[in-house]
Image (tube, coloured by chain):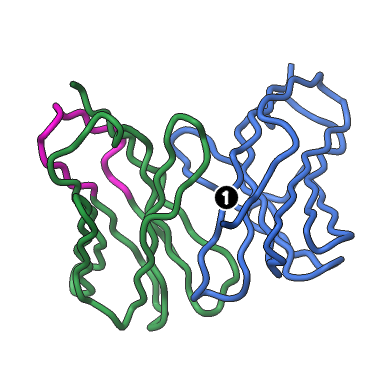
Amino acid sequence: DVKVTQSSRYLVKRTGEKVFLECVQDMDHENMFWYRQDPGLGLRLIYFSYDVKMKEKGDIPEGYSVSREKKERFSLILESASTNQTSMYLCASRRGGLTDTQYFGPGTRLTVL
Amino acid sequence: AQKVTQAQTEISVVEKEDVTLDCVYETRDTTYYLFWYKQPPSGELVFLIRRNSFDEQNEISGRYSWNFQKSTSSFNFTITASQVVDSAVYFCALSVSNNNDMRFGAGTRLTVKP
């Protein structure tokens, strides 16, 4: 079974803090994704990566950056957390192109005070 | 542009009722894939089904069935004889050939009461 893990289920940070969300997949997938989920808005793509050190912006990249130094790990970074970044963050991975399925991690619920 | 609409925000049924979750999509691509995911209270999205644009056959898996109609751009999901364990948020999603990501609907929260 594909396993996507996220470093924390719940996280509480203060405004202005730098926040790291970590995601690890164990199936050698090429593609990895970060989404945020908000009520009534579904999942929105923040960034994705199709290879080590490669990244592309999604729909809402502002206020976020990412890092992929190793194939299995994809990190989401909030340089200076703000209250409007309080949300559920979901990581996903996918082996190849559209014919493959995205597998999701359990999510990290981030609260910024 | 790609878009997925799940018009039903919340649905509540009593156990053993049948329920249909609607999904309407928009795309100009001729090659695309449609998905349904289930998000139980634990939070992790669970893959249910993938359908490509060239296969309009309906699919049944146990109590779950999917009705794909290109004429109405819909990919509806029916749960027959619903159970309490079906309570979750269900997402419909779309992938197209010229894009590397998936476009998700807003989700439908299904509550099945005993």
Q: Residue at x 19, y 63 (%)?
A: B67
Residue B13 on the magenta span: yes
Depth check, front residue: B65 or A62: B65
On screen, A53 above or below A111? below
Depth check, front residue: B62 or A48: B62
On screen, A38 above or below A67? above
Image chain in blue: A
> Over which residues does the magenta segment extend?
B6-21
Rendering quarter of residue A64: top right
- Residue lying at the far top in this picture: please name it: A113
Q: Is residue B48 left or right of residue A101?
A: left
- Residue lying at the far front in this picture: please name it: A1
On screen, B5 above or below A108? below
The answer for which chain carries disc 1 is A
Residue B69 on the magenta span: no
Q: Residue at x 72, y 66 (%)?
A: A28
Q: Is residue B20 left or right of residue A61?
A: left
Say what amino acid the circle numbered 1 marks: Phe
Instruction: Locate residue A35, reporting x and y percent.
Output: 62, 48
Q: Is residue A78 left or right of residue A98?
A: right
Rendering quarter of residue B51: bottom left
Instruction: Locate residue A92, reporting x and y percent.
Output: 62, 53
Image chain in green: B
Tell how many labels: 1
* Residue placed under numbered mark 1 in the picture: A104
Q: Residue at x 21, y 33 (%)?
A: B83
